[in-house]
Image (spheres, rainbow, N blue to C red):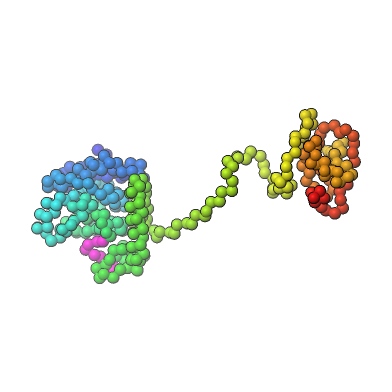
Amino acid sequence: MMPWNTTVRADGETRTLSFVHTHRQDSTTITFRRNGQYDEQALNQLNWFLRDWRNDKPARMDPRLFDILWEVYRESGSRQPIHIISSYRSPETNSALRRRSSGVAENSQHMLGKAMDIRLPDVSTERLRAIAMRMQYGGVGYYASSDFVHVDTGNVRAWPRMSQQQLARLFPNGNTAHLPSDGKPLPGYEQARAQIAARNAALATQASAGGGSIGTLLANVFGRRMPAQPPSPVQEPTVVASVVPEIKAQPVPLPPQRPQDAVIQTARVEAPLPPAGIALAPASPSETVASFEPILGFDVEAAVQSLFEPKTALLDMGFSSGALDDLSHTRFTGPAIKPVPRLEQDPSPRSMWAKAG
């Protein structure tokens, strides 16, 4: 058996509880949740351990009850096992107890496997009640003379009711669904009811999906960690621009801004590649272009037409308003047939594409 000081794994995913049954005097330590999932074998062990001790009849206990006890235990800081006064009650036992006491409910949560009466030897019953009430996840009964607290997974309620002053000290912001003894709710009563309803709906959804994240949700909403529910962010619709698979960029430095001539080039039809033996070399800032003459002549119309002839290699022909020694950053490096003069730029700052059109 695990030592009592390792009863609880406070990681919200793996949860272990230790119990001592005060009537049978037996004890157990069981990990009921592993990696966020309830362990069915462990739950079956708990069902048997929490059976009706008068006739040994078991029932299926509500697993949420174990989550509540786990949170109460962690909040209390106890280092002792949980002492069980009562857990499951068979209908026969409940009827017998009702004949002896008017304080036993006809449709008790104990009969449904949703309630336990507990005490912690190293925590006062009054403090144990306060911790359970702050959870706001079910009913809390305070039995000071018998030194135990009733905890169940039913509606949020408490008995006997606290006074207005006591409840206000327990919930300074007034955000509670518990009612004081005079029946007048605190200021945050409606807000607390709305939060609890939303929380319970979320828990029901998580449980129907397999309970994978119920533990985390419970840990976030129990006790002092139950903030107001913020509105869900609106997800902007995703626009699919292309069905072409994404191409990863090469690890090269990007220019300060996108060159304008690159936009023009995307609209052009690519010309055939130059014949073999003619190479296109990248420009180098340290090189000069004095020994190379432009391939275009004085006739601007003919020069433009030559750009679209199949025999002409496609070069980057971006122009600027200033005079250039070269037409682009890509130069023709093959031997020229004959020298041709430079292209005279039109005085008006227009692109050759406008002339050609």
Residue drawn at x 33%, y 56% is 200
Residue extending farthest to the top is: 277
Question: Could you tell whether 345 is left or right of 26 in the image?
Answer: right
Residue at 59%, 46% (x, y): give it. 242
Q: Position of residue 349 (x, y in %)?
A: 83, 53
Residue 162 shown in magenta = yes
Between 54 and 24, the one lying in front of the other is 54
Q: Nearer the viewer, residue 231 or 240?
A: 240
Q: Is residue 4 left or right of residue 56?
A: right
Q: Can you tell which quarter of the image residue 176 is in?
A: bottom left
Residue 28 horizontal/vertical position (percent): 22, 41
Q: In the rendering, at what x and y percent does residue 19 appear? A: 22, 45
| Magenta residues, start to end | 157-165
Q: Is residue 172 above or below residue 355?
A: below
Residue 332 in picture, x, y percent from top left: 81, 36
Look at 78% across and 37% down and name the residue there. Answer: 310
Q: Which of these two is toward me, 330 or 130?
A: 330
Number of numbered callouts drawn? 0
Q: Quadrant of residue 245?
A: top right
Report whether 83 appears left or right of 198. Answer: left
* Residue 334 appears in the rendering: yes
- Quarter of the picture holding the N terminus: top left
For image coordinates 21% across by 63% down, the residue present is: 160
Query: Is 251 situated above or below 145?
Result: above
Task: Report the side of 15 relative to 330 (left or right).
Answer: left
> Is residue 172 in sight in this rendering?
no
Residue 179: name its quadrant: bottom left
